[in-house]
Amino acid sequence: MNDDEGFSSLQSVLKWAEQTGKRLRFYGRTMIILAEALVAGVGEEIVALKHRETGEAEEFLILSQIAKVQTLQEMYHL
């Protein structure tokens, strides 16, 4: 999947991030940062997050509470 196509839902974006290893920043409805992490897994109602590439899931967010997702990988290469 190209970076700019095939995104029809939040789950599709999260699954893409899981497959590509993109680090994401998650925002809540009031634009407060909920987490910054890699996607470890995506379910129907939650997303599992990990902070190290080889680590296991350490955090879990409820999908309905996520208002915005931003990729961060480019920022770490400056």
Image: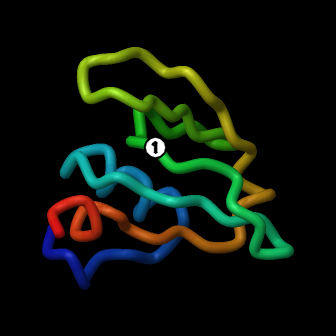
**Colour mapping used in the image:** rainbow
**Vertical position of residue 21 compared to residue 78: above or below:** above
Using a 10 Å C-alpha cutoff, classify the residue at mark 1 as few (fewer than 14 neighbours), some (14 to 19) or many (20 or more): many
- Relative placement, left or right, of 7 versus 11 is left
Q: What kind of residue is marked 1?
A: Ala
- Residue 74 coordinates in the image, percent (x, y): 22, 69
Q: Position of residue 7 (x, y in %)?
A: 38, 75
Mark 1 lies on residue = 37
Query: Residue at image x 26%, y 29%?
Result: 53
Q: Nearer the viewer, residue 61 or 44?
A: 61
Quarter the N terminus occupies: bottom left
- Closer to the camera in the image, 74 or 43: 74
Quadrant assignment, res 5: bottom left
In the rendered image, the residue lying farthest to the right is 30
Q: Is residue 21 above or below residue 54?
A: below
- What residue is shown at x 58% (from left), y 40% (from top)? 47
64 on left or right of 42: right
Q: Position of residue 63 (x, y in %)?
A: 70, 52
In the image, farthest residue toward the bottom: 4
Q: x%, y% of residue 71?
A: 37, 67
Q: Residue at x 53, y 68 (%)?
A: 69
Asked whether 29 or 42 is in front, the reply is: 29
Residue visible at 66% across and 39% down?
46
> Element under label 1?
strand
